[in-house]
Image (cartoon, rainbow, N blue to C red):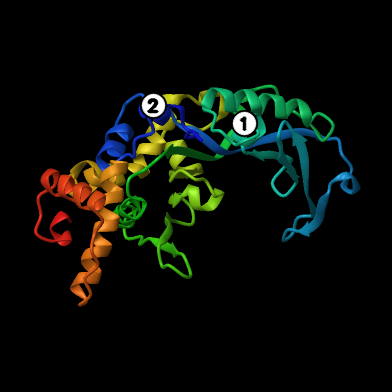
Amino acid sequence: MTPYNKYTFNNNPKERPLTHQEIGRMLSDPLLELGVDKLKVCFPVVTILANPEEWASCKQEMGGLRPKALVGQQWVPLGYHGFSAGVSTKNGQLGWVEFNPSKIVNENGELVGITRSVEVFIDILHKTSGLFEISADLHEFAIHRLDLTVDFAPVADMQYLLDMAAKSSPFRAVGPSIRQHPVSGEKESVTHATRTTSCVIYYDKSRKEKFKIPTFRLEVQSKRDDLREMGLDSIAGICEDKARKAFYKRAQSFIDICNQTPKTRIDEILSSKEDRNTLIYSAGYKFVEQNGRKVAMTPHQKRKYGKFQKKWPHNNIQDLF
């Protein structure tokens, strides 16, 4: 398996486990390539072509002194996935589409960037021609949500990354929501969210998707206020530079923690498959010994541990941390 994000893959060709400092440096790259996980665009509708009964989900709502409003929604297959299209007459005639461009373009969900996402959006507009008639001016197509994502794989210490994610503060006075495995207690995701601004999620993508290689995902879900502040008001003005600004506004605190946290010996040990395996089995022997039982190592294990101890001098396993 290779990481979804091309940037990460190009900078980690041998799939050596990445430490938190290496991830911090990658995220700090001014040419960081971001993937798009979701895009929602709203726009004025000239004419609603589909009748209420033609929408898969449709309801009539009473809005105060206003007449009943039509709210319809439809799922439309496209590529390897599809998209949601909807319409509302609550405040004039408004249409919207919401989609994951990466799932539409690639069967395995491999992330695509901003440019490809806009191309998918244009294709979607052609597919909605039977639902409503719309204006051709892209300045009227307002971006209401943009999920920007980057993956790192393999990582040396998933739990350490999620611990740092919990310490980050993308929003003032907003604490993290942490999801843990019900049995092991290990962190699976860390979420920082507000109701109106945006949301930042860090999670173990490999656990969720059952990947063999440990994959860490950082996702910034930007909503209307953040997007407008960064100049991402409409599809006409969308570009990589503006998207990076929206991403960094919420991800910067995590990046700072990664860059400022010293690289410990345990990080370097975990980044080496041989050293990591030696640490794990030698720690088991030491634990058994500390609890009153001595188990002899094989000659091969003694040689491996002797080499390990020479490379990483320590009196007990705790010294390595």
Q: Which corner quadrant of the image does residue 175 belong to? A: bottom left
Viewer-nearest residue: 175 or 81:
81
- Other-residue count near label 2 (Cα within 10 Å), few / some / many at <14 / 14–19 / ≥20: few
Mark 2 — residue? 13
Q: Is residue 90 left or right of residue 277?
A: right
Amino acid type shown at disc 2: Pro
Q: Residue 171, labelled with which disc?
A: none
**What number of labels is visible?**
2
Which residue extends farthest bottom? 292
Q: Nearer the viewer, residue 234 or 69?
A: 234
Query: Which residue does the numbered mark 1 point to in the structure image?
Result: 141
Q: Give the vertical position of 264 relative to 119 (above or below).
A: below
Residue 60 picture location, percent across and down: 81, 56
In this rendering, position of residue 211 left or right of residue 40: left
Residue at 56%, 33% (x, y): give it: 110
Choose between 261 and 271: the one closer to the eye: 271
Where is residue 13 shown, x and y percent of the image? Answer: 39, 26
Quick check: 1 left or right of 186?
right
Q: At 74% from the left edge and 43% from the top edge, which residue is drawn?
A: 86
Q: CA distance from mark 2 to mark 1?
A: 39 Å
Q: How would you rate the neighbour count of disc 1 (Cα within 10 Å): few for under 14, some for 14-19, many for 20 or more? A: many
- Could you tell me which quadrant the C terminus lies in? bottom left
